[in-house]
Amino acid sequence: MKKLVVLTGAGISAESGIRTFRDSDGLWNEYRVEDVATPEGFERNPELVLNFYNDMRKEHQLHQPNYGHVGLKELEADFDVRIVTQNIDDLHERAGSKSVLHLHGELMKVRSVRNPNLVTTLTDDNCEIHLGDKATDGAQLRPDIVWFGEAVPNFEPAVELAQQADIFLIVGTSLNVYPAAGLINYVPYETPIYIIDPKPVPVPSTRKITMIQKGASEGMKDFIKMVKA
């Protein structure tokens, strides 16, 4: 069974109604990155940061996977599908995908500020954390999100997946956010690369790439036809 490695970004979730951070109506227009997505911001005003992610969790529960997500689950019948996502939502998991590697953390998980390996998964019914909520080691809980200025611990496992790809698919990312954008450079030269995105995406001129210039759902339908032909 061929290994299909997929890199997904904000565009695939935007089709489900989840606001991106960088678009014209994105979250960074309402909040400063430095205030809610950096260790320094958390140190200055932890209550603001915790409430920001509490609100995001409640808002994300209102949205459902689209065919961009569901199509990847369906492809598991014919391929060994491994998803690497830049997104912190759980739409891939809710669509049923078995192998999802989150580069930037997971919205529904929290961890100890002292021990990054001490992680707790929240539930839809209990998705808020506040000042004074402690991990089992007695330290304050924080979102299990990779903030700006922090290391991306899952990047090396993502590189290993990219190196093993028989087919590499990119969905809904502009390839502007590093280190995730650099994964394309680890894909074997002979491996076909497909990109689904309604906007042009800058790619290495030395690679043979098939562009599907559509949204995630419609583009996924085209991609499935191509790889099953």
Image (cartoon, rainbow, N blue to C red):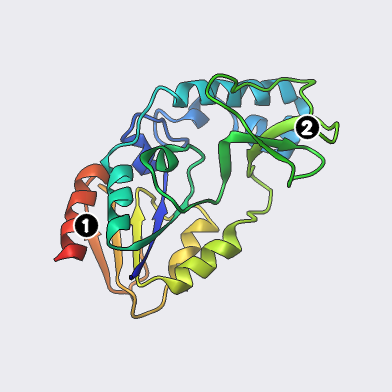
Q: CA distance from mark 1 to mark 2?
A: 43 Å
Amino acid type indicated by mark 1: Phe
Q: At 40% from the left edge and 30% from the top edge, which residue is drawn?
A: 18
Residue sitting at the far right: 138
- Res. 175 image quadrant: bottom left
| First in sequence: mark 1 vs mark 2 | 2
- At mark 1, the secondary structure is helix
Check disc 2: other Cα within 10 Å, few if <14, some if 14-19, many if 20+. some
Q: Is residue 176 visible?
A: no
Q: Is residue 63 visible?
A: yes
Residue in the foreground of this view, choosing between 164 and 44: 164
Q: At 35% from the left edge and 30% from the top edge, which residue is drawn?
A: 64
Residue in the foreground of this view, choosing between 121 and 188: 121
Q: At 66% from the left edge and 26% from the top edge, which residue is drawn?
A: 49
Check disc 1: other Cα within 10 Å, few if <14, some if 14-19, many if 20+. many
The quadrant the C terminus occupies is: bottom left
Amino acid type indicated by mark 2: Ala
**What is the x, y in percent for residue 4?**
35, 64
Q: How many marks?
A: 2
Q: Which mark is residue 223?
A: 1
**What is the x, y in percent for residue 80?**
37, 63
Question: Horizontal placement of 166 versus 55: left or right?
Answer: left
- At mark 2, the secondary structure is loop
Question: Horizontal placement of 32 versus 77: left or right?
Answer: right
Residue sitting at the far bottom: 190
88 in relation to 161, above or below: above
Write down the residue under mark 2: 135
**What is the x, y in percent for residue 23?**
40, 35
210 in relation to 199, above or below: below
